[in-house]
Each structure stands twice: as C-alpha cells, then as structure tokens.
Amino acid sequence: MTRYVMVADLRRCVGCQTCTAACKLANGTPPGAQWRRVLDIEVGEYPNVKRVFFPTGCQHCSKPPCLDVCPSGATQQRDDGIVSIDYDVCIGCASCAVACPYGARYIVDDERFAYGASPTVDEAVNINPDLVGVASKCNFCVDLIDAGIAAGLTPGKDPEATPQCVNSCISGAMTFGDIDDPESNVTKLLRDTEHFRQKEDEGTEPGFYYIWDGGPP
Amino acid sequence: MKVKVKDGVACEIMPNFDAEGIHPANGKCCVKAYGAVQKTYNPNRVLTPMKRTNPNKGQNEDPGFVPISWDEALDTICDRLSKIRDKGLLDDAGLPRVAATFGMGGTPVSYMGTFPAFLSAWGPIDFSFGSGQGVKCVHAEHLYGEYWHRAFIVCSDTPHTRYIVSFGANVEATGGTCAVTRHADARVRGLKRVEIEPHMSVTAAASSEWVPIKPKTDNAFMFAMLHTMLHEQGREMLDLPFLRDRTASPYLVGPRGLYLRDPQTRKPLVWDLGSECAVPFDTPGAQLALEGRFPVAHAIDVGADDDVATYANVDGETAMSKMVTQLAPYTPEWASAISDVPAETIRRIAGEYLEHACIGETIEIDGKVLPFRPVAVTLGKTVNNGWGAYDCVWARTVLAMLVGALEVPGGTIGTSTRLNRPQSNRLKSVTPGDDGFMATPLNPTDKENWAATPTGRNAHATLVPILGNSGWAQALGPTHLAWMFTRHPPENWPAPTYPDLWFVYRSNPSISFFDSEELAESVAQMPFIVAFAYTPDETNHMADILLPDATDLESTQLIRMGGTKFVEQLWKHQGVVLRQPAVTPRGEARDFTWIATELARRTGLLEGYNGAIDRGAGGMALKGKGYDFSLDPDTAYEVDEIWDRACKAATARYSNGEKVHGLDWFEEHGFFVVPFKQVDWYLYPTMVEQGLRFELPYQERLFRVGQELSNRLHENGVHWWDEQLKEYAPLPDWCDVLDTWDRAVTNMGIDPQEFPFWLITTKSMQYAAGNNVSIQLMDEVSQNVRGHGRILIGAITARKLGLREDDWVELSSPIAKTRGRVAISEGVRPDTLVVPGQFGHWATPFAKDLKFPSLNSLAPMSLDLTDSTGSGADLVRVSITVLGDAA
Amino acid sequence: MSWGATSRLQRFWDIRAACNFIGGGTGSSLLVWATLGLFAGLPYFPVALIGLLFVAVGLFMVWLETGKPWRALYLFFRPQTSWMTREGIVALPLFALGAVSVFIDADVLLPTTSSSPAVPAVLAAILALAFLYCQLRILNSARSLPAWREPRAMALVGLSGLTEGFGIYLLLGAILGFVAPAMMVTLMVLVIARAVVWRAYIAALGRSGAPESAMSALSAMRNGFLITGHALPVVLIFLAYSWPGMATTFSALAGVTATLGGWLLKIVLVTKAAYIPKTAIPKPPVRGRRSSSAGA
C-alpha cells in the first residue's frame, strides 16, 4: 500500500511563508484562500516564551471528519490517503469546513482578485474559477503526484512529482513521501526523530507529522 | 529560479533544481521571488514614459503625469544632460551636477543592466542622497568589518560553528535562502544560537535561547562578556598564539597612547621575552610578550600631523594589557543594571562562548590545516548603526580575536569587500601595509590632502576617513547629512546645492529614511528628477520624468553568482547566471540596458559607455587573459549583443579560456559555474601567507586619524562634529546610547520622560530590500506573521494600558505622530514597541490603502543622533495614546 | 493577528444557518406537539402547517447559504455518513406526510370521508423528531467548534427546539383558543429543564477548555437568554394562573418569550460563540539544544 504524508520539521521552519506563496501560485487560489500556511504561535509568557512556526493545512487524515459530513460526496479519500474535493460536485454547504479540526478548508463565495474587481493578466490565466462557492483545501498537489507517478517518478523525491510547498521550502522543513515504504525519506526521517501529530486525541489519524526533537546529534 | 509560462503569461515561480548541490540553498528561492508574477502584472504599473505637467511639487500636488513616447522622454533627459555637460560636470560649489540614488543591499545593480557603464562614462556623479543607507544597513560593520578583516558583511561560518551569540542579527529574515538553509541544517545538528534583542524576532524564535535586552545596550553586554573573559576566566581559555602572532596585542603603547616605535624603522615595538628588550614587531625569533609593562630604552611615537615624540627609558604597555585595563570596570553586574539582563546570564553566555571555542583544535579544509574555532558573534542592524555601534563591532571582533575565531573555520568571518578592490575576491584585496597590518587606504586627513571642500553632498571624504574614496564609498557616507545640509547647512560649511538632475531607481527615500515627511519636502526641492518607475510612489511623486524599465521576469542581465558575497553567500562554486526574459515586457517597459545605451548614444558618450562595459561595468569585463569580446567604441549595441559578449567573456574567464558560451547557451542552461575553494571562505590563510596581523585590539591609527580630522575641522571653524570625533579613541569607552538620545531630545526643548517607550523596527523576509510593498501576495502571506502592519506591544504593557488585539493607538515621538493597530505579543519587552518594515505610504498604489505605521515618520534626523561614521539607529522615544477600536 | 495564534470566529455559517436551526427546531417540534394535540382533540392542521412552514423557511435560508445552490440535489449523495444528507432525506417524506396530514385534517384531501390524519401525522411527527435529531448531529459534527461539538449542546439545542415549538404552540393556542392549564405546566417544565441543561452545558464547556472568546460570547447572552427565555415565561405563567382573565394572553406571551430565548441561543451559538480554538502546540521544537560535533 501507499500512504502519502507530509512531515514538517518545526526545528527548521522560520515562518517565511515561501510555501504559502508557492502554493497560491501553483494552485491558483484566490486572495484569502491559503491551502498551505505557516502559523506564528507563541507559547508561554514573557520572558519565558517560545515562538513556533507551524506549517499547516489539510492533514489528510486517515479518518477525516470532513469526509463523513460531506453530503454531496465531493470530498473523497484516495487509496493513497489523499483527501480530495471534486469541485464539480461540492455544493459549498461548509459542513466540512466546520467539521475540520484543523481549520484547513476555505470557501470563497465570490470571485476575488488581488487588485480590485477584475482579474490581472496572470489571474485571468492562473486563478482557478472552479474554486468559487465551493470548499477547497490542500490536495498535496495531487495532479503533480499523479503525473509524476505516470512518468515513473517518485513523489517526495523527484520535484516534478512533489507538492510545491515542499519544493519551495527553503529551510528544508517540509518533506513528503510514502510512509508505508520503509525506505522512503519520510519513514526514515520519522524513525530518527521525535514527532507528533495535531490533535491526536481526535482520532482522525492525520497524515501530517511534526518533528520537534531528536535525530542524530 | 524558474518561471512557468502559460499562454505567454508568467504564472508560477519555481526553484531551479538544476542548481541543487551548487547553490547553498539548492536552487530554492526567497518568498519575495514568488511575488514576481504579480509584480509583472500589477495593474498599477507605470507602463509608458511619463512627464510631469504640474510644475509645483509637493505631497499635496497632483503631479499630472501624462504618457509620452520614449523618444520624447529620452530627448528631454538628454537635452538636459547635454546642457549640464556644457556648463560643467561640477557646479559652483564643486559638487556634481548629476546625482543618483539606488535602493539598498546592492540589489539594484543586479537589475540595472549596463546603467553603471553610463554613469561611469558620465563622470562625477553624487551618490550622496541616501535612501536609508547608514540607517537600514549594518553600517559600522560595513566600515570597520572591512577595515579589520575585509568583511563588508560579517557572518558566522554556519556550516561549522557550534555556538553563535547573536545581538539582534535577524539572519533568518534578512539572510536570504542560503542563510535559512545553512542555519536550519546547523540547528538540526545541534548548533546553539543565543539571540539577544529587545523583541523576539523570527531569528530569536528559531534560536536556542532568547535574551530580552534593553534596546541599544548591547555594547554594555558585550563589554561585560569581554570583562568576564579577561578578568574572570583563565588565560588558557584564550587563543594566546593567535593573539601573539596574528594581532597587535603585543605592540607596546607609550604615554601618549601611541605605539612606541623603533626610531630607525618606525616599526611598532614589542617586548621580546628572550632578549628582554623591546624589538620591532617583526624581529625574527622574538618571543613576544602579550601582557605587561616594560621599560623601553629608546623609542619614538608618531602622532597626528606627523608629530613625532622621542623617548628614552619610557614604559611601554602591551596593547593587550591596555585592553584588559580598559575593560576592568565593565563587570556583568555593571552591565546588568544597564541592559536589564541578569549578570549571571551574561557570565554564563561568556563562559559558554569560551567552552565552545575549541582552543587548540584544527580542521583540514581543501588539504589545508586551519584552526577550528566554532564560535561566532553576529550583530543586527540597529546594533550596528548610530551611537554605540562602534563599541559593538569592536567588541564583536575582539570577542572573535580573543579565542582566535576570526576568519577561521567555525568562527566569525566576512563574505565580501566593497570599499577595497577587487570586489570579486576579498582575499586578493589583502596586501601588506604599514605596521604589519593590511593596507587600507583612508581618506586623507593631513593638512595638504584633506578634502576641505566636500566633493559630494554627504561629505564622506571630508568627514569619514575610514570610508576611503573608492566607488562605493560615497554611497556609504553619512547619507542623511546630504538631506539635512541641503536644507539646513551647519555652521562654517559650504552651502550645498541641489543637483541639476537626479536619477532614482528602485528606491523610495521619502519612505525609507528618517523624518520621512520632511525628507519628501526635500525631494520636492530637486530641480529635475528622472525616476525609473515601477508604480507611482512617494519619491517619484516629485519626479519630472518617469521611465518604465522591464522588471524581473522581462529583462536580461548576466549576474555573478557564487564565491563569497553578501549575507551568508559562501559557495563551493562561482560563476554567472543569466536572468532572461520569461515574458515580453508589458506596455512600453524597456530593458534597462537598452535605456542605458540610448542615454549614452544621445548624450554622445558611447565611447566611454562601451569602454566601461569592456572594463566590467556591466558586471563582467569583456576582455581578459586569452579572450577579447570588447565592444566597438562607436556602436550602439543591441541588448542581446552586449549580454552575448558578456556571457562569452564570463565563460572564458571562469574556464580559463576552455569554454566560450554565448547567450543562446545560457538561455538553455541558465548558469555556468566552476569550483570555488572552500578554504577561500577564510582570510586567515592569506594573513598567514603574507605574515600580516589583524589591526586589533588597539586602534592607534584611527586614534591618530581622528586627531588629525579634529585639527582640520577646527582649523575650519567646524565644531558640530566634535561629539563624533570622540569615537576616535584607541580603545572604546562605553557609549551610553540611551542617554545620548535623551540629551538629543532635551536639546529640542522636550522632556524625554514624556516619551516612555523605546520604538524599534525589524525587517521581514517578505519585504526586506524587496521593492514590493505594492504586491498583494506579499501582504497576504505576511498577514500570517505576527506584527505585520501592526505595532507590536508586549503583553504586560498591553494589559496595563487596557489594549486588546487590533486596537488602534497613536504613537507620538518628539517630531511626529503616527497611527496604527496593535499586535500583542509575549515576545516584546515591556519598555519596547516594534513597528516592522517600512510602510506609511501615501502615494504608492495598494500600499497606501494598507494604512500601516512606520518608524521612519517618527525618527528625527539629527546630528546629535549621528555617529562618527555618519549613521543613525532605528530607535525613537515614543508615547502611546489609546484610540480603541476605531482610528 | 496571525492566523491560529488566537481563537477565531467561524464565518462559514452565518445567520442563515442559525435560521435553519431555528426553523428546524421550532417547526419540527411544532409538528410533534400538534400530533400530540391531535390525540387530545386539539386543532391540528393550522399548527402542523405552520410547523411545516418553519421547517421550509429554515431549509430555504440554509439553501441560500450554500455556495452552489443549483447543485442542491447533490445534497443527497452521501447518506452513509452525512447527517446533512440524512436531514435532507428525512425532510422529503416529512413534508409529504405533513402535507398529507394537514390536507386530510383540513378536509382538502379526501373531503368526502371523515378521515383522521392520525396515521400520517404520527409518521410525520416521528420524521420531525428525526429531522430535529439530524440537526443536532450536524451541530455535533462541527468538530472545529467546541461550543457546538460539546455533547450537551445537542441536549440543549434539542430541548430548546421542543421548547420553541411548544412556545409557538401556546401562541397558536391563544389565537385559536385551545390553551389548557396543562400546557402551561408543560412549558414551565420545558423552560426549567432547558435552564438546567444550559447550566450543565456551560459547565461542561468550561471544563473542556473551550476558547475564552466563545465562553464570553455565551456569557454575554446569558442574562438575555435566561431572563427572556426562562424567567419571563415562568413569571408569565404564574400571572396566567393568578389572573385567569388574562391567562390566554399571558400564556401566549410566555410561549413567545420562551421561544425567543431559544432563538437567541441559536443565533448566538451560530454567529457569535462558534470560535475555532487557537492552535495548540503540544511540544515546542527544540532548536539546537545539543552541542554538536560537526566540522571537527
């Protein structure tokens, strides 16, 4: 079996938002919708405070709450673990958006553009009009993955088959791959490090791991 | 980077994975690069040349720009330029009639094609009018770093270091992709970085420890570290051989604070423990005493204006001992009271620094055995500017020196030279000079050669000897003096004139400099402004002609890559990369090289222009050993032809003539590199090869130069630089920066206590040096970063003032007021406020609607707040008025 | 403020969604009460008709809220797991049977025979309860919102639905003249029960560590909710008992206030208390703790 997961090394991330920007261009999301974003979180109180940069987005859960609540069947789960949305089917009811414990879903009701009411030249070509009025979220750049696999490439290893947030990440914080493959980059990375997943007590079994410590000194 | 183009439209920016293993960040590009798509298609772009129709200039005047043809625009400019040439390149005050201002960080040079060749062909240009230079850069580091270790920019040897003490260096935000990659790797392998700064920046966040320090008291902290190392720890913790052989520590200092010198050779004397007498420092076989006071039988010293004193039986104390004595009062307890950092923390950090220094260890790099000293000290922008900055760069360099961690693997190293040549290889800029140090030409201060009349409006050659007078020196002068003096000339100073024509590119001084409102008024006084304009902005609002240049994705330029340069750009390769048009320029935007060629052609300067390109003004000399792609002097070349020759010259040069690739090859392959030796990251081997010493810790030469400058200025009746002259001390006395500020405010007739908070600023990766405030994507992604567009306030203070997140407040400084929303943070000291970035726009489309506050509008430009290098710090006393949830 | 650093109010569902909970709760329970009344010989069809209208208006409002209203039929595609699909599926026979009952009772359908609507009415009432239950499960499925997913929210909103329906039932009783003392007692029991469940809900929410902003939104409406929806109805019912001449008016007012209290609860719950908690970091990263041997 194949189970694609994302790994974010919190020790590396500096919150630069390069992944956020890369994702927006790669997926043509309208202003305000950020399938990938990096949160800037403070933990503790002055002066004993830590500031954590926390990449987040769809966690591609094994037991996704969004999947169960979706009335239209637009939200689907693939055998490789990727949770996707069929934008031609979604009715934009937002059940999934309030069901997602990770705040990963967006609904943009009206056409929105970077500079006012009409699209810029690039937006006219690049903005995905299917995203208006429906729920949208990170899909692990599934089209890239599928095309890459078809071309004999390995997602997470070959950039042409890897989500753009990972490709763009300048600190090396983001890693993607098949956790069911004992030799994959993510499997090895997680084997060597201390990590957690968001809200593990939800029982959603996210496919998004956060490294916080560990590894060879 | 690579660009994805769909239907002739640029849609996506992607890393260039072809550079994996070559580029230190493996071809990844900065977040700002992802804004290049919107930058290209921003509907607010200026897409045709324009001329002003309203002769009145000012913030409230509509410029009335109307589109004109390129012919009309260039004819108008060149007509004016020709008249200037007819009148003479210098005006009656001896100042260049043409001035030019470019944005920070050397970035514009990578975009302006061959324009530098036009400027070179023109003759004297005044680069005095800064847009934040000396204030927004790391000014003291630029000047003294280059002076002491050819380090215009200083960084840690991140791949090797184990312990970094960082005083406000925001390297994770401003160090680019290479720094972020290198530091992330280092963190994971266990590097400990301690970040000492008043608010928790991105860099503090990603550090092992954050030490909140009172703003601008870093010098006290660092002096206390030095005190701990010299007075509380054993000497075996220091790198004694390094101090003895590679620094001036053993040099004997006489009663006048000058080196005691051999009467015959004038060489500085040292104490030879073998012969028990004073000998010239380079006496073979001498066993140099590092510390102590020794009787010298015969000696001279050389003071200001060649005032020689002769001594018999005089006591000489080593420079090291002088330093030890100088630092005796600066205990951690003393520093604690000033910096609000517990003495034990300072002591611990000094101890950790020593423990990690690995004294005695070596490492082999490229077959050479070098000292391995994996400790570094880095300094941030505000630490490096204005009063106290000299203390900090001196202390930083001495901290490295004491453990031999200067310019060796793991230590504190430089990346580039700008004031000394060649800029392409800092090691080659090292040549033997006087007294066993590197030769560094300073601006003359002797009576005969001192530039009594300023040659530029910021008077860099007159007031700042350490700058020297090479191409970059003027732009690094006291740039705010140019703005201040044109409006309010000081006493006994030639009245400065405005230049007849001012070129502005990728720069917006009306926003990016202190006292921005008054500065905009000064800009309005400029008789004729030619602005290369991306969108309307606060500076080109006063322009007479706007010229649209092709932007990042539309233009061609061959740019040097690799080697060592800029911030943490330490590569194992060097070569060139081609920026090639991914899309055709929008509207009437033209490639900068075309514009430069047209200016040269129409002003009859083609010969000089082509000659300058031949010599490398476009970034790469066209003629060298075994190759010659020189331009015909009288031909106006097409853009592609110029870059084709540059490509060929570059490949021939880097491959030693083995390969010659033209533009077509680069269009396919993107870049060309050859290996660069890692050992060349470090200056130490060069110093050893040439038998040179770092000019540390004692600043005898600067002391003498300062006295000479003092003599010259006083002879001319200038006394308003006296405070600055006090910085020319052989060893620094601690500068109380906050008190200096208070005195400056008091001099304005205002009680500083009315402004109880210290306002500082911080850069963000999304905007630093980005010229991208009008890019919606940058604003959108920046909203994820705490404090973007806000006033950051500590949670404790916010609670005291009853402030909630996003409440509006008004900040008042002694000169102005500004409004903004607050962001509450646990990572800000209670006495400190932070306004990130530089905003406060009123003309730039998109940015003006953001209503973001700016420190620049509140910070005064003042001689009282200017240090001897001509820089000022981003620090302002302010008060807060709570406005609630509506402005 | 950067996203996720503090709790934030969900903006996906607004007052239109609240109207669905209002219409669905009030309308479905009105159908239930009407059916019970039917067996007590009280008027059925006007009450049931209004109940159906409430449900319909609620659904219409939520239909307006969807991003792609013309794809409404896709709503029915996932009955296996989606309570929204199930709500839609239940709504269809609910309207059909409700309409049949109403028409029978109003003698529009089968006017020549004196048929009783009892069978379809009971079936409609069962479907109404199912419809209400679906709504509660929809609320409970909102796992990003502590104020909704708290199990006692289902009890509270369910009970409130029954109360609101009964409040309207009393109002209609006053208008149509079928108010009985037992009905006032019933309302009293319902509002007291709702107040008790409210207390339990707030206490549980506090224990679960719900966002402060959610707690304060609820706390801000507490007085309005408890006074309008509980104290006033109780007082009015006492007045109705002690002032028989005005009993009908007072009981109608009691019904209205009890209903308004419930509607306020739902509006606040959907539009003001639906906070997504700030992101919690269970283990902050360790950045360079160890000393390293690199480079040696």
Image (tube, coloured by chain):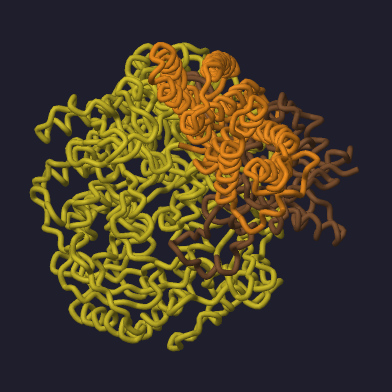
Q: Label the brown chain with its letter.
A: A
- Give coordinates of residue B332: x percent, y percent: 40, 14
Question: In the rendered view, does C115 fall on the left or right side of B153?
Answer: right
Task: Using the image as rendered, state which of residue A26 and residue A98 is in the foreground.
Answer: A98
- In the picture provided, is B417 more to the left or to the right than B718? right
Asked whether B635 or B25 is in front, the reply is B25
Residue B265 visible in the picture: no
Residue B715 image offset from top left, x and y in percent: 11, 46
Residue B509: image quadrant is bottom left
Question: Residue drawn 27% across and 58% down?
Answer: B129
User: Going by the picture, which residue comes out furthest to the bottom?
Assistant: B634
Which image quarter holds the C terminus of chain B? top left
The colour chain C appears in is orange
Instruction: Determine the colour of chain B.
Output: yellow
Q: Quadrant of the N terminus of chain B?
A: bottom right
Question: In this picture, is B320 found above or below C122?
Answer: above
Q: Residue furthest right?
A: A1
